[in-house]
Structures are given as structure tokens and as C-alpha cells.
Amino acid sequence: MKNLYKFWILAIGILLVGCTDDPLEDLEGTAWQKERNIVSLLLEGQIGTALIERDLDEARIKVFAKTENIADLAKVEIKEIQLSYGAYTEQTVGTTLDFTSGETMLEIKSGAGEPLAWHVELLPFKSDLEGTWYVGQIGLYADLFTWESWGWEKYEQINNYLPELNPEFDNTITFTVEGADENGNPFGVYEHNAGNDGLYGSFTDVANEWDFNDRFRKIPKGRGTWSRNFELNKVIITDADRVVHELDLEVLAETGEVSLKAEVPYQPELFDWNEQNWSYEELAHMSRSMWYTLTKEYEAQTGNDITAITVADQDGEASIDVDNHQVTVTVQDNGADSSAIELTGLALSYGATASVAVGDALNFTTGNATTVTVTSEAGESQNWTVNLVVKQAIEGTYTMASALIHVNQEWGSDFSKEISTDFPDALAEYDNQIRIVNEGMDGDRPFGTLTNSAGADGIYGDFNHPDADVDLNAKLRHLVPTGDSYWELDTTTGIFYIGASKDEITSQATLIATETGYVLAFELPYRELEPRWDYGNYDNYMCWTYKYEVYINKN
């Protein structure tokens, strides 16, 4: 029975095969192979990827190349060609195409033998980087704890932090295409030249002693080589010392500019919350990336600031108020003619010019001030007021004109007050005579005696609040002691020391010259006592005070 069953199954199978065509016939032949596409094409001298377009029987390819680097346009070698499945051509790898007219035909046949003529154009390659560029912007991106609800991010121009970078903006950067590698990636010569000023920018701030050249100098100076990686969209620059710089390329089609971007080490774990200048932290640890924006047209700079100024016999550095366009310079009182004070130094925004030059005489006869006009490279003018303060010789007799106490509340508003507003008995100090006698020099430091004598009322000021539990005598009285004291001046820093003797200094102040005398600016211990948190005068004056300024006028 079992063998009979097998026989019937075999008989039925033979009958079915005899009644149908061969089911494998279509797959075993080539009649079904209709594709005639070129998938990819790489020719001698080609740069980048060929552009392949097909609309039914209309088939075109555009190939870009540095034609001047091809030895014979009549014999342009096929380096690589990939076709759709089953398709074939007689123009295989190693054969050549004739582009003497700029174009040629390439015939592709399907597996079924149906031909399709492909129209191939050889076009001159123009890199989006090729040519000479000017530096438009140099920026950074800082990530200041954006993963926290209170964090924030910042995009900033690096030259706003580092003034010595400004000479970079008239530099030129040139990319010259010399050829392409086996993948069609262009390469050539790179050159970064200083501009008309002959200077490269530096990622530094000399005044703060910051140097970030190692961190941000991603586009090297001088000559080197470059290549473009289309797949990764990167530009690789190798400088003369064989140091490789990999930069992300972004083509800004709307403006015709390009951006070259590089990552920098991001180190939030090194952030110093006690650092007074957070700009340093943004530069040193919190920046994630930096970039150059390159432009074909030179962009004249718009800055018209005075960044530094000196005059003859100047004492200390000038004070510069950028917001109000004012500068204050202090000179020693040496009897000089205020109508002809020599300008000995002047620094301006990059590319700007001024209405005066070093060596000119400035006239301060009208209100101890003069005007200097600064014009940006772009032609925008700004008038600056330069104020002159004549510093009196420190020895002499003074009276107190006023005294300000400065309060910085931890959770409230900051304010400054005349001390007598809340401490009216302090007014008794204002008729005192403060006499400063110069007794000699200790190295380069003058020293002598300071005598604080009670005035006509015969009493000294009292810093005890009449209505509140606030007695500031222990906090303030020793700053300008009663009677005779020792003083010493560090002429380099402007710090004025006061005490019982040279070895017993009890206070120190920054000495600031005014039109009529000096300001003694004392720093006070902040949060010296624990606050009561009621923000009354106790907290304000016993805990939150941070500076006390005594204004003394020369008699």
C-alpha cells in the first residue's frame, strides 16, 4: 500500500510538468534584464561626485574636473564605473573617452541587449573654497551648564574677549585647487597671509595675561596644503610643520560665505565659581567650538573706541568709560601748561583713526577737558571727551568733603550712601584737619606722618547709630585714626598704608586723585558678622558693607 501511494505521487508530478512551460526559463535567461543605468562614474582628473540624471531615455552625466590638469582631453581615462545589475558596456575601466568638444557619449546596454546612450559633459571644477577670502568673524559657542534648568548658552565673537585678535580681520586666506585624489576629493595649496597691517591676530589678552593660542588657533598661519573630504564634509589643512587641522565646512549660500568650524576641549568640571572674570571661564573651559566665517568681500571694521591713552607726566592708567565715551587721565602737578599737554600714546579700535596723533598737544583749558574724534574703518565717527585730573602733591592739609559707604546685600539690592545719612554724628568729622607730611623715601615708597585733628567743635565723628543697634566705630574708626599715624604709599599700585608704625599697619586704601584732592577707598570685610536676615540697618552696615570711600579736599 505504501509503495502504491508513492507511485501515484510520482505519476501526478510527471503529468504536471508535461502540461506547463519551464518555470525557471525567465530567470535563467537575460530577457528580463532591462536596466541600463550608470550608478557611479569616476574619470581621470574628476573632482567630487558625478551628477547623474535620467528621465526615461534622456540620460545625462555631469563630471567636474580641473581640465588643465588632464594631459589629453581626447583620452580621458575611466577610473571607475558601476552599472545597474546585468548592464554592460564596452567602455570599461581603463578605456578612455574623448572630451575635446567638452562632451561625449557613453553607451550602456541592458542584459537583454537594449542600448541607452548617456550624454557625458566634462565641466570645469570650481570649489566652494577656491580663491582668496577675508576673515569676517571669529566666534565661539559656550555651553554654560545648559543641561541644568538655570543654565544658558552663548555665541560670542572671540575678539570681544581677546583684543589682540583684531589684526586678524584684514588677513587673507587662499585655497588653490591643484587636483583630486582617487575618490574625487580636491586638494591643493593653502596660504594664510597677514593683511595690510602686516600682523596676525593673537588669541591673547595681555592686560589679563591670558594666552589661548593653543586652544583657538585652528586656522594656521603661513603656507601649507589642504584637501576636501566630501563624504565627511571636512577641510583638512596641514601646516608647514605638518600639524593637521580638521575643520567642518559649512557653505553659507545666502551670503556667499563659508564657515570653518573646529571643536575645542569642553571641561565644565574645571569651572571655577570663585573666578571673578567669567569671560576667562567661557574661554578656558566652557567653550565647545570655535569658527571662522570667511567672506569674499572685505568688511571694514565698525569699532570707534579709545582703548588706551597716555599723556606726558601721566600718573597711573587712564580710566575709560566706553558707554559714555569718556576718558580720564591723571597727571602730576608739575606746573605744566594745561593748554599743551603732549599726547604720548593712543590705542584705538582696530582700523580706526583719530583726530589727533601721538606727539600732538592737547588743550585742556576749557573745563579741564578736550575732545578727540575717533572714526572707524567703516567711516563711523564718535566724539570722545578726555578729562584731565591734576594730581596734587600728597603732602598738605585736607578736610573731609564726604564719605560714602557701599552695601552689597546678598539677597537684596545694592546701594551706596553718604555715611552721615544714617550716622548723623559722623558729621563732626567733616571740620577736622587731616595733615599729611612727607618725611622721606623707603626705597621707591614715600612715607611720613598723617595727623587727624579735631576741628573747631573739638570732637571727632562718631559712627554709632542713634536709634539702632549698629556701632560702626570698630569697623571704620581705625581707617583714618585720630591723632598722629604713620603712612606709606606704594606708587606702583596706588595703595596708601596707615598705621601706628611701619610694622603696625592697621588699614590700607586705594589712593585716587580728584580735581580737588584724593579719595581714600577702603575695602571692608564682607559678612564680617552673621546677618540677622531682617535687612535692617544692622545687617546692611555690620554684615553687607564692602567699601568705604573718604573724600578729602586740599585746603
Image (cartoon, rainbow, N blue to C red):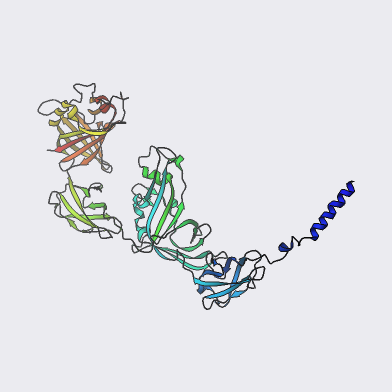
Residue 554 picture location, percent across and down: 14, 39
Left or right of 105 on screen, residue 12: right
Residue 62 picture location, percent across and down: 52, 69
The answer to which image quadrant residue 279 occupies is top left
Please name the residue shown 31% across and 31% down the image.
Answer: 411
Whether 201 is drawn above or below 324: the answer is below
Please name the residue shown 29% across and 57% down the image.
Answer: 302
Residue 384 picture location, percent across and down: 21, 52
Of 22 and 188, nearer the camera is: 22
Left or right of 511 on screen, residue 159: right
Residue 348 picture location, percent across and down: 27, 55
Of 82 and 151, nearer the camera is: 82
Left or right of 479 on screen, residue 156: right
Please name the residue shown 42% across and 52% down the image.
Answer: 290
Q: Can see residue 1?
A: yes
Whether 214 is drawn above or below 59: the answer is above
Of 7 and 105, nearer the camera is: 7
Left or right of 478 on screen, residue 206: right
Of 173 and 481, nearer the camera is: 173
The answer to which image quadrant residue 473 occupies is top left
Whether 436 is drawn above or below 342: the answer is above
The answer to which image quadrant residue 407 occupies is top left
Please name the residue shown 65% across and 63% down the image.
Answer: 85
